[in-house]
Amino acid sequence: MDAATARRVVVRPALRTMRGRLDAASHLLRRIPVRWRIATVVILNLAFITLLMLLIGTGATAIRAAWGDLQEARRIDRILASIENDAGRLQTLIHRYFALPNDVVLNEIEQRRRALLGKLAVERDIDFALENPARSVTSVTERFMLGFDELRSVRETISSIYENEIRRPASELSQLYSVVETAMAERSALVGPSLGKSREAFSIFLVAINDYYLTQSVQAQREAARSIAVIQATAPVMVDLAETEFQRAALQALTDRTTALRAGFGRMVQVLGMQNRLLQVEIDGNQAVMATVIQEVAERARAREDQAQQKLDQTLRIVFVQAVGIAGIFLAFVAVIWTVIARSIRVPLDELSTSMGAIAADRLDTPPPGLDATDDIGRMARSVEVFRQNAIAKRMAEQDLVAAKDRAETALAHLRETQQSLVEAEKLAALGGLVAGVAHEVNNPIGISLTVASTLSRRIDSFARDVESGELKRSKLTDFVQGSREAASQLSLNLQRAGEMIQAFKQVAVDRSHADRRSFDLAEATDQIIASLRPTLRRVPVTLNVDVPPGIMLDSYPGPYGQVVTNLFINALTHAFPDGRAGTLSILARAEGSQVELCVRDDGIGMSADVKRQAFDPFFTTRRGAGGTGLGLNIVANIVTHRLGGRIYLDTEPGQGSTFRIVLPLTAPHEPAERGEVPA
């Protein structure tokens, strides 16, 4: 057996023994409420902190003295660093101001200048190390600011040159270029190439001079110089190539402005060079002197700081040794107590957390441990058990809810099937009414035709007897021919009328039953539908006006369209003119771009706001006991929005009649539109 194995053999039993003792102690502590266990931990922590405070207090006097010396030395060093930082910041602001002048930077320069001079005036006598150097720094700062005032004067001169001798001539040059280009008769004129080269050089000059003015870039200066040289070189050439006196005068003025612009550019280069020299000598040079003076004083201040730091370090080492020695012993004792108390709380909480996780994962078979404990965690365990029982009850309730939902969905499916059956029944009922009306209308011409045919048959029999007896006279032959012509004319007229009505009914019936898509004339389709509905008007005192202009061609579904018109017609006769009320029903249409607007308007009794709100709802009717199904307007709305791809609007007031406004596309969608809510 090697040494490592021997150590494990010895250590493991010892660890198991220690863990067993800790568990036993934790079990005993569970008889104490958790708040008292936590209070014990707090008391031990306070005792430990008090001991540390006492140990630290023993060395407080020595530390305070050493710390005071160190703070004084650091204060002096901070003052020097602050002065040096302010001077450096002031130098940076001055450079920034002359790179891009603005009032905000200038105000900040003045504020920092006053703050720096005020700081030097206050701090010059606080320590021997700053007495003479402070006056030197003040003197250097004054020279520093005098240089700044001189630079401001130079900057104003630069701004004046830029505005008066650069920007103004450049603006005039730009205008002269435009004048010359306007005066050119053709783009191929002789002056064109030189003018283009000069204009390009002028554009480069504008960019370069602005760059040079803002950044003092040497590259920008050279670019501007080259560009102005090109402009000045091409100006005489353009004067010689001028074709008219007006061009020559404009180009001569351009030459003069170019000379003035070049002179202004030269002055700007000269004054900007003077500004840079002043920045180097008066600003950067004085700032370097200031940094040297401050550095000398800082070295003496740092020597004092090093001495104070050494004294403080020695004091802290002594206090540290005392604190570690005494506090280490006390901390070992407290750690054992902390471990026992922590296990008495952590282990039951872990078990409780595991139980909560099992409940969250819907594993509800095992109750949480510690239900018989008397401490706070035991009460928590019993609360978790209540939560588990509630979760079990919730699971059962959810199962019942799912079963009830399935039953409700089945009932809803049955209800929808019933609704669809009622809708189809309503459509068939409308078609049946149409058949009855057409049959009544066709009966008249066919009856007349039968009467005429019977009369003609009798006259033919009489004519045949006269022919057989040889008593035929010319007058009888003439009467027979005339009567036969009249009978044939009446037969032809009445049978043609019946044929037209049957053909119209056939087209309407086919459209209603098949709902095929085809191109049709709106006026023709409407007339066919109205022809099948007119027999209904004979029983009521209602006047029908139809104003549908011909030529409105629709690529849509005539059958569903006929169903819409029929339902609106029947709805108006049934609800707008009750109890034999007289009135007028109008059907109007007009084309609007790629759409057609159809209005079905009556001057009947109208609808209340509540009836209007529910007018398109399925199964809603105001004549429930008088044969109304409540599906007529719902079918209309579904056909218009779903089949024909349109929109329907209802405008009505009580006593003011009702207007159904239908907007349909000239070309219906190939796929039925999604069902949506019908607009009111």
Image (cartoon, rainbow, N blue to C red):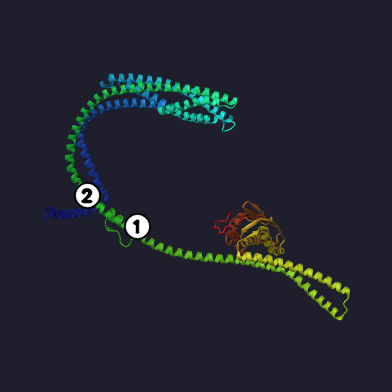
Q: Earlier in the sequence, mark 2 or mark 1?
A: 2
Q: Nearer the viewer, residue 497 or 112?
A: 497
Q: Is residue 627 visible?
A: no
Q: Quadrant of residue 537?
A: bottom right
Which residue corresponds to the image point at 29% horizontal and 25% vertical from the top-left? 80
Taking the image as shown, residue 31 lies to the left or right of residue 617, namely left
Q: CA distance from mark 2 to mark 1?
A: 30 Å
Disc 1 element: helix
Disc 2 element: helix
**The disc labelled 2 sits on which kind of residue?**
Thr
Q: Is residue 26 above or below residue 156?
A: below
Q: Which mark is residue 360?
A: 1
Q: Is residue 403 visible?
A: yes
Q: Nearer the viewer, residue 553 or 20?
A: 553
Q: Quadrant of the C terminus?
A: bottom right
Q: Which mark is residue 487?
A: none
**The disc labelled 1 sits on which kind of residue?**
Ala
Which residue is the extreme one toward the bottom? Answer: 469
Q: What crowding class fits label 2: few (fewer than 14 Cα within 10 Å), some (14-19), or many (20 or more)? A: few
Q: Which mark is residue 339?
A: 2
Taking the image as shown, residue 198 lies to the left or right of residue 608, namely left
Q: Is residue 537 above or below residue 73?
A: below
Taking the image as shown, residue 47 lies to the left or right of residue 203, namely left
Question: In the image, residue 235 lies at what x, y percent?
Answer: 52, 25
Q: Nearer the viewer, mark 2 or mark 1?
A: 1
